[in-house]
Amino acid sequence: MGPISVLIQDSSAIKQILDEVSSQLPVSLQAKLLPAGHLSSFQAQVAAAHRRIETRRSQSLLRTIIAETCQSINKKKAALDAKVDTSASAHRLCLLEKELEDLEAKVRATKQRIQEEKDLIAGSKQEAEVLTSELKADLTELSNLSKQVVPGADEDDEAVLAEVDRIRLDAIAAIDAFLQ
């Protein structure tokens, strides 16, 4: 527990001393020392800042999981996009059906190729359904993981801590200056 944490817990002793000597101090020094007597009012902010910093520092694994999940989702989305685009297969199917009408002599060979293209389209649709299901599950998981990340930045919370420490140091410096 650092000096800030101790003072934040109970600054009543500082306030009491300041109340006793304030009439003997110049107004400029009183203005510098007044916030130091009320450091306990920062207790909730300092505690919350410490908790958020600790939580963020412990979330490196969560951030790694989220990054890996995003990469996996992007790969599955690319695969899904490739499987969903069946326009080339449908176009080949139309050409083959027209060839069947034009070339009665090649009926059996052409029918076989048509069936193969139909199988390819059906297989692509089934694979697309599986990938769509997996993608939905991954997006749900990503959403749940993202909700666990503590918002904000350490810099903001460290700024709160620095401000409280600055007030403490200003009070100490003002007392030192007054005593000299």
Image (cartoon, rainbow, N blue to C red):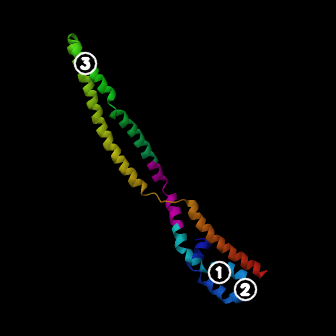
In terms of secondary structure, what is the magenta stretch mainly?
helix
Identify the residue at horizontal 24%, vertical 20% (top origin).
97
* Quadrant assignment, res 71: top left
Looking at this view, is 162 or 31 the one in front?
A: 31
Horizontal relation, residue 153 to residue 36: left or right: left
**Lower position in the chain sequence, tag 1 or tag 2:** 2
Which image quarter is the N terminus in? bottom right
- Span colored in magenta: 49-66
**Lower position in the chain sequence, tag 2 or tag 3:** 2
Looking at the picture, which amino acid does disc 2 mark? Leu
- Residue 51 sits inside the magenta stretch: yes
Which image quarter is the C terminus in? bottom right
Q: Is residue 63 above or below residue 28?
A: above
Looking at the picture, which amino acid does disc 3 mark? Lys
Identify the residue at horizontal 54%, vertical 66% (top origin).
50
- Residue 132 sits inside the magenta stretch: no
Identify the residue at horizontal 76%, vertical 81% (top origin).
178
* Quadrant assignment, res 177: bottom right
Q: Residues within 10 Å of mark 2 (few under 14, many from 20)?
A: some
Which residue position is annotated with label 3? 98
Q: Any mark on residue 25, and which?
A: 2
Q: Is residue 53 above or below residue 177?
A: above
Q: Position of residue 139 (x, y in %)?
A: 37, 48
Q: Position of residue 28 (x, y in %)?
A: 72, 80
Looking at the picture, which amino acid does disc 1 mark? Leu
Does dot 1 land on a helix, a strand or a loop?
A: helix
Q: Any mark on residue 34, and which?
A: 1
Distance from the alpha carbon under mark 3 to that under mark 1: 93 Å
Asked if labels 2 and 1 touch by Cβ distance under 8 angstroms, the answer is no
Q: Position of residue 49 (x, y in %)?
A: 54, 66
